[in-house]
Image (cartoon, rainbow, N blue to C red):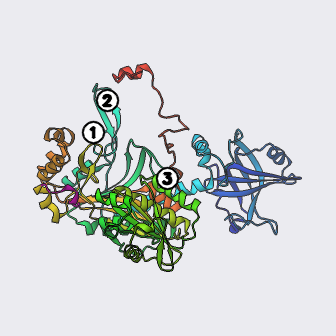
Amino acid sequence: MLRTHTCGELQEKDISKTVKLCGWVGSRRDHGSLIFIDLRDGYGLTQIVFDPKTDPAVHKEAEGLRGEFVISVEGNVESRPEGTNNDKLPTGKVEVRARKLEILNRSLTPPFEITDAINVSEEARLKYRYLDIRRPSMQKALRLRHKVCKLARDYFDERNFVEMETPILTKSTPEGARDYLVPSRVNPGMFYALPQSPQLFKQILMVSSLDRYFQIAKCFRDEDLRADRQPEFTQFDIEMSFITEEDIYELSEGLMKKIFKGAIGADLKTPFPRLKYSEAIARFGCDKPDTRFGLELVEITNLVKDCQFKIFHEVIKKGGLCVAINAKGCGTYSRGQMDELIEFVKGYGAKGLANFKVEKGSLVSQIDKFFTKDELSAINEAVSGKDSDMIFIVADSLRIAYDSMSNLRKLLGKRLNLIDEKRFEFLWITDFPLFQYNNEEKRWESEHHPFTSCHPDDVGLLEEGASLGSVRSRSYDLVINGTEIGSGSIRIHDRKTQELIFKTIGISAEDALTRFGFLLDAFKYGAPPHGGVAFGLDRLMTFFTGSESIRDVIAFPKTQKAFCPMTNAPSAIDEKQLNELNIKIKK
C-alpha cells in the first residue's frame, strides 16, 4: 500500500508514529520558513508541516505544491503547537512533520474551490462532477448512501428475502410515463425499453414461488424533470406473496426505523398514522400532505351556495367547490402581500382568491355585502376564525380548488414559520381511487398502474359498470413531510380480473396480449395473492442529508433537461451506427 493511514484517521494515540499519507493538496499556507498544507482524501483532512530544519530538499519541493496536486507524504505524527488545535476536525490535535514527499500527479487550477462553501452554478458542478464529488459534503452524502443500502440489505436478509436482478433491456409496456427505447441491431425495426419499474418481473417472480423478493433497482422514465425527478433513479423494490396490506405496513415501518436510526440516529415511532385518500384531499387538498403544521382546508360550498356573490354562485352551479383556509394572524397583510398570493394561486389554475379579515368576531371584506350575516358567521365558525385572522377562499373545479389551496397552505406554512424542519412526520395514505379520468383523452385510466387490485367492498361496483370514480383500490403511499417516499399495492393475481381492468381503461384484448401476454399467461398456472411496495432511495437520501435536490445525492445525475454536462450525453451518433440499427434521422 502507498499509505499506512487515511487523512481522517490520525489521533493523539498515533503521536511518534512514522506514517505515509496520500491525498490531494487542499489549502496551502506559507509561514515564513514553515509551509503548511491540508492533505485531503475521501476520509478527512490532515495538516502536514514542511520544515527546512527537518529536510531542506523536501521543504524546497513543497514550495512548488499547488491546490489539487496528488501527493504522497511520509513523516512523523506530532502534537500541534499549543493554541493551534482545530476542534472541528477529528485529526485537529495532530500534524505530520514531512520527511519525504512525492508528487504523484499535478493539477490545473480547478474551476471552483474544493470546499462546501462554494457559490457556483449547478451546471458547473455537474460539468466538473469529479471535482464536485471531492467536496466533503458530497463525500459524506455518497458514503451515507452506501450505508443506507447496506442497512436495507441486512434488514431484508434477516427476513428471508431474496435479492434478485430483473432485466434492464425489456419489453415496452407503456402505461404511465414514456419509455426510453433501445433499438435492436439483430432484430431490425424492433426495440427494447428500459424499465420504468420492475413491476411485471417481480409479479412473475411471485408466480415462480420466490415469495420474498427485493432489489435495489434502477428505473427509467422519459418525463419532464423537477428537483425530485431524474430520467434514471433508484428504488428499494419489494414484493411478497400470501400477504395483506398489514404485512406491507409492518415491513415498511420496520425498514424505515432501521435506516433512519442507522443513517442519522433518528428514533421513529411506529405504527405510522393512516389517512384515507378522500380525507387527505378534504383536509389538505392533496394526497401527500405535510402534517407537521395545521392550516387545514375547509370546504364551505354548502354554506355559500345561496349567496349573492356571482363568482361563487356560478362555480357551485357548475358543480365546483368553495374551499377556505384560515391564515392565522395574517389579518395585517398589506395589499401588496394579498396581490402576491392572488397571483400565486392563479399559477395553479385558480381564477382568483377571495379574502375576509376577522375583526371583532365578524368577517370583513370588500365583498362582504354579497353575503348575509348568517352566511358570514357560518364561514367564520367553519374555519374557527379569531380576530386578526385572514380567511382565504378559492371557488373553482374540484381539482383546481384543492390544488391551488393545497399549495397556498404549504406557502403559508413556510412564511409563518409553522414547520419544524427537524421533525419527521410519516403518514400512510390509503384507499386511493382505482381510476382517474383523463380529461385530455376523454377516458378512464389507472390511478397508479393497471395491476392494482380493487378494494374488496367495491368489486361489485366494478363488475356492474358503476361510476368508476367511486371505485377504490388496494393501494397505499408512504408520505414523509409532504413528500411521497413510497408507493405500492396489493396486485391482481387472476387473469379474468386483470383482463377486466385492461378493458375498463381502454386496452383491447388484442392489445393486452401484445403488451402483457406473458403476465396473463403466467396467471394461468396458479398465481398466488401478492403485493408490494417501492421506496425512492434518492428521495430518502435528501432527508438524511438535508438536500433540496436529489441531484445532490446521486453520483452522476442529469440536469432538468435530462442532459449530462460532464459527458455531453445524449449525443449524436455517426451514420454507420445508424445504418447498423436500421434507423434514419428525420431532418
Q: For the residues marked 3 and 1, what is the alpha-carbon distance in whole angstroms?
A: 28 Å
Task: Please identify the residue farthest to the bottom as the structure is shown.
Answer: 360
| Amino acid type, residue under disc 2 in the picture | Ser
Q: For the residue carrying disc 3, how many other residues have a C-alpha within 10 Å: few (<14), some (14-19), or many (20+)?
A: many
Earlier in the chain: of badge 1 and badge 2, it is: 1
- Nearer to us: label 3 or label 1: 3
Q: For the residue carrying disc 1, how many other residues have a C-alpha within 10 Å: few (<14), some (14-19), or many (20+)?
A: some
Q: For the residue carrying disc 2, how many other residues have a C-alpha within 10 Å: few (<14), some (14-19), or many (20+)?
A: some
The image quarter containing residue 253 is bottom left
| Amino acid type, residue under disc 3 in the picture | Ile
| Amino acid type, residue under disc 1 in the picture | Lys
Query: Which labelled disc corresponds to residue 550?
Result: 3
- Characterize the magenta stretch by its predominant secondary structure: loop
Earlier in the chain: of badge 2 and badge 3, it is: 2
Residue drawn at point x = 32 percent, y = 58 percent? 320
- Left or right of residue 231, residue 202 in this image: left
Quickly name the residue at label 2. 184
The image quarter containing residue 220 is top left
Q: For the residues marked 2 and 3, what is the alpha-carbon distance in whole angstroms?
A: 32 Å
Earlier in the chain: of badge 3 and badge 1, it is: 1
The answer to whether any part of residue 262 appears in the image is yes
In the image, which residues are magenta? 465-473
- Looking at the image, do the residues carrying marks 3 and 1 touch, with CB atoms under 8 Å apart? no
Quickly name the residue at label 1. 171
